[in-house]
Structures are given as C-alpha cells and as structure tokens.
Image (cartoon, rainbow, N blue to C red):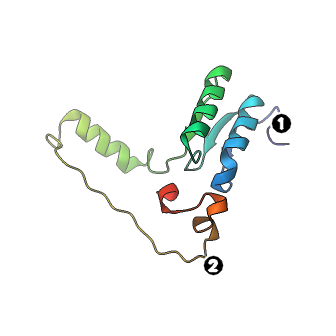
Amino acid sequence: ALAADPQVDIIYIATPHNMHCELIVMCLEAGKHVLSEKPMVVNAAQAERCIEKARAKKLFLMEGMWTRFFPTTRAVRRLVSEGAIGKIVSVSASLGFKSEPSFNPRLFRPELAGGALFDV
C-alpha cells in the first residue's frame, strides 16, 4: 500500500526488529528510499541483503540513529574537527533506563529480536 504509492519517496520502518529486513527489502524493491529504526536488522546476513538491494537500486538506506543530527552532536563534531577542544584521547558515554516486560514487551521477547543490545 504505502510502498506502492507514487507520492511517497521515503519510508520510515518502525516495526518490531524481527520485521525490519523484509520490510526494508520490500520498500527498496518498490523503489522507495528507507530510513529504519535501530537496529536496522538483526544480523550480518540481513544487513548485507539490505545494503546490496539499496546499492543495486541506487536508493538511500540508513539506520535512524536518533542522536546523529542533534544540534549538540553537530556542534561537538564541529568543535572536534576545528581542534577547539584539543586532542581527544578518550570518550565515555552512558545511557540507560529501567523497563519492565509488561511495559515494553518488544525488548524482552526473543521472537521479536528484542534485548538491550539491539536497543542501544
């Protein structure tokens, strides 16, 4: 439906992780650019499949890493590239949150390719 709409140029995939690969390939085959929620796929074979399809079709494919285009991220990258904060020798970052299976089941159900490693 959406992939067949000629007025749609790009599709954002935000389904459970285990569905991403098939939906990405379907959208690419329909000639649509794709932005996928993280993780884009759940293993290397799926990544290769999606990337090869995007290259073959000459379409944009990107994992939607939500912090990449934040103004603060861009500002820090600029400061680093300009040498404004000196030589970087180490970086440490941490992000965490508490979640319960009843609140967010996709993170806890293996059949949905859940788990902390796929959500960070």
Q: Is mark 2 on a helix, strand or loop?
A: loop
Q: Residues within 10 Å of mark 1 (few under 14, many from 20)?
A: few
The one of 10 and 114 positioned closer to us in this rendering: 114
Residue at left offset 55%, top offset 77%? 100
The one of 1 and 56 positioned closer to us in this rendering: 56
Q: At label 2, which amino acid type do we have?
A: Ser
Name the spot of residue 80 as percent of width and height, x first. 24, 39
Task: Write down the residue under mark 1.
Answer: 5
Residue at left offset 69%, top offset 39%? 24
61 sits to left or right of 77: right
Name the spot of residue 45 as percent of width and height, x first. 59, 37
Residue at left offset 66%, top offset 47%? 20
Give above or below for 66 relative to 99.
Answer: above
The one of 27 and 71 positioned closer to us in this rendering: 27
Total marks shown come to 2
Evaluate if marks 1 and 2 touch, with contact meaning CB atoms under 8 Å apart: no
Task: Write down the residue under mark 2.
Answer: 102
CA distance for labels 1 and 2: 36 Å
